[in-house]
C-alpha cells in the first residue's frame, strides 16, 4: 500500500509507538496530544522522554495539540485511555476511518470503545487493532503480531496494509466485538496473574487462574455475540499471555504490587500511567450481570482491587469454590 496521511490521537507510550511504526512504514503521521508542554518537548527532542525514552521519532512524524483543529486524514488512530475516548473522538469529526487502538471499556456504560467511537462519529468506518503488543517491543523491532477488525474486510485489509511490516504482522477479522472484549478483559486477568505472583504462589496457581479466567471471558463474549475463535487467537490468548507474564505490563505490575501489600493509590502513583484493568474490572461485572454469565475469577479480582477482600482470602475463595464441568453454557457456568 502507498503512503497514507495518518493522525494518531494520544501521545503516551502507545500512541508514540504506533506513530513510530507507521512513520517507519513510510506514512505521514501527525501525533496529537493533550499536554502542550509535552508536545513541545516531543517536537524539540524528537523523543518521548517520559514514556518512550531512547527512541528517535522519525522525521515523518509531525506534532499537534489535541485542542487545536485537526484536519481529516485518511486514517485516524485512537490511542488514549478508555476514559478519554469519547472526548477525543469529538476532535475527529469528519475523519473517515477510525482505528481504535485503545484497550478498555467505557466506565459506567461498559460499552466497547469502537461502540463509543461509532456513537460520536456515526459517518466514519470504525474498527479496532489489538493483540499481544507491548509498546516498547514494537519500537525495538521485536517480531510482533496483531489483528485488525472491521465489519468490512476490505477496510480491515486497508488498515492491515498500513501497519504491516517485516516485524509487525497483521491479521484481519470481522469480529470487532470479540477483538475489543478480549483486549479489554485480559487486562483484568493480568492483574490477577500479578496478584498470584505477588502472593508468592507458583505457576500452577497462575495457570489455573488464567485458564478459568479465559473461560469466563469467552463465555461472556459468546453471550454477547462474539466468536469463540477470537478468544483463542491473537486478541485473546495471545494478548493474555503477553500481558499476564510480562513485567512491562502495567496491569501485571498493579496486581503484583497488590499481592505484595501495597495500596492501589500507591501503586498507580508509582506506575504513573493508566492500568486499564482497574476500571475494566467494574465494567466486566456490569456486562456479566447484564448477560447472566457467572464470572467468579473476575469477581475475585475486582473485590481485591476495590479492597473489599484481602488478596489471600480471594484466592482461597476461588480454590474452595465447587468445581464444575468445563465448557458449560454461560447460563450454567
Image (cartoon, helix red, strand yellow):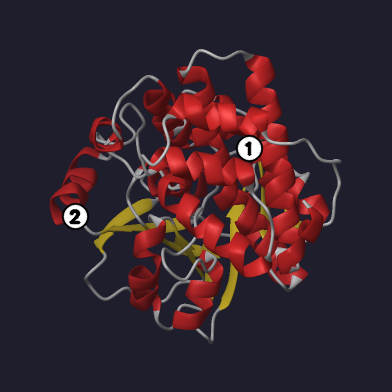
Residue 132 or residue 28, whichever sits in front: 132
Discs 2/1, front: 1
Residue 196 or residue 254, whichever sits in front: 196
Q: Residues within 10 Å of mark 2 (few under 14, many from 20)?
A: few
Q: Report helix, strand or loop for mark 1.
A: helix
Residue 77 or residue 182, whichever sits in front: 182
Residue 15: give x, y in percent of width and height.
Answer: 40, 49
Q: Which residue is mark 2?
A: 35
Residue 41: give x, y in percent of width and height.
Answer: 17, 44
Q: Is residue 256 left or right of residue 128?
A: left
Q: Which residue is mark 1?
A: 240
Residue 202: give x, y in percent of width and height.
Answer: 61, 13
Indicate whether 319 appears above or below 38.
Answer: above
Q: Could you tell me if residue 43 is visible in this image?
A: yes
Q: Report helix, strand or loop for mark 2.
A: loop
- Location of residue 64 (image quadrant): bottom left
Residue at position x 67%, y 67% from top? 291
Task: Name the mark on residue 75.
Answer: none
Residue 52 or residue 208, whichever sits in front: 208
Q: Is residue 322 left or right of residue 241?
A: right
Amino acid at each position: 500500500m502507498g503512503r497514507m496521511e495518518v493522525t494518531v490521537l494520544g501521545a503516551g507510550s502507545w500512541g508514540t509507538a504506533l506513530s513510530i511504526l507507521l512513520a517507519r512504514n513510510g506514512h505521514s503521521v501527525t501525533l496529537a496530544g493533550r499536554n502542550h508542554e509535552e508536545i513541545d518537548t516531543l517536537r524539540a527532542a524528537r523523543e518521548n522522554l517520559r514514556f518512550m525514552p531512547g527512541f528517535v521519532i522519525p522525521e515523518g512524524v509531525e506534532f499537534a495539540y489535541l485542542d487545536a483543529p485537526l484536519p481529516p486524514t485518511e486514517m485516524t488512530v485512537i490511542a488514549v485511555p478508555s476514559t478519554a475516548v469519547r472526548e477525543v473522538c469529538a476532535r475527529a469529526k469528519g475523519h473517515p476511518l477510525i482505528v481504535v487502538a485503545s484497550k478498555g471499556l467505557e466506565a459506567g456504560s461498559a460499552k466497547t470503545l469502537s461502540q463509543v467511537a461509532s456513537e460520536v462519529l456515526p459517518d466514519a468506518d470504525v474498527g479496532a487493532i489489538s493483540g499481544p503488543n507491548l509498546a516498547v517491543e514494537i519500537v525495538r523491532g521485536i517480531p510482533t503480531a496483531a489483528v485488525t477488525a472491521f465489519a468490512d474486510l476490505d477496510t480491515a485489509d486497508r488498515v492491515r496494509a498500513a501497519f504491516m511490516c517485516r516485524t509487525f504482522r497483521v491479521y484481519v477479522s470481522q469480529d470487532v466485538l470479540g477483538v475489543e472484549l478480549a483486549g479489554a478483559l485480559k487486562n483484568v486477568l493480568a492483574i490477577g496473574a500479578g496478584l498470584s505472583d505477588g502472593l508468592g504462589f507458583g505457576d500452577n496457581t497462575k495457570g489455573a487462574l488464567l485458564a478459568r479466567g479465559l473461560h469466563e471471558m469467552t463465555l461472556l463474549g459468546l453471550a454477547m455475540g462474539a466468536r469463540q475463535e477470537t478468544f483463542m487467537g491473537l486478541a485473546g490468548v495471545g494478548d493474555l499471555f503477553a500481558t499476564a507474564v510480562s513485567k512491562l505490563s502495567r496491569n501485571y505490575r498493579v496486581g503484583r504490587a497488590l499481592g505484595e501489600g501495597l495500596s492501589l493509590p500507591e501503586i498507580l502513583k508509582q506506575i504513573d500511567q493508566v492500568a486499564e484493568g482497574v476500571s475494566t474490572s467494574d465494567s466486566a461485572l456490569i456486562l456479566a450481570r447484564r448477560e447472566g454469565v457467572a464470572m467468579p475469577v473476575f469477581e475475585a479480582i475486582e473485590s481485591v482491587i476495590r479492597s473489599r477482600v484481602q488478596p489471600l482470602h480471594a484466592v482461597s475463595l476461588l480454590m474452595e469454590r465447587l468445581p464444575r464441568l468445563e465448557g458449560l453454557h454461560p447460563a450454567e457456568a
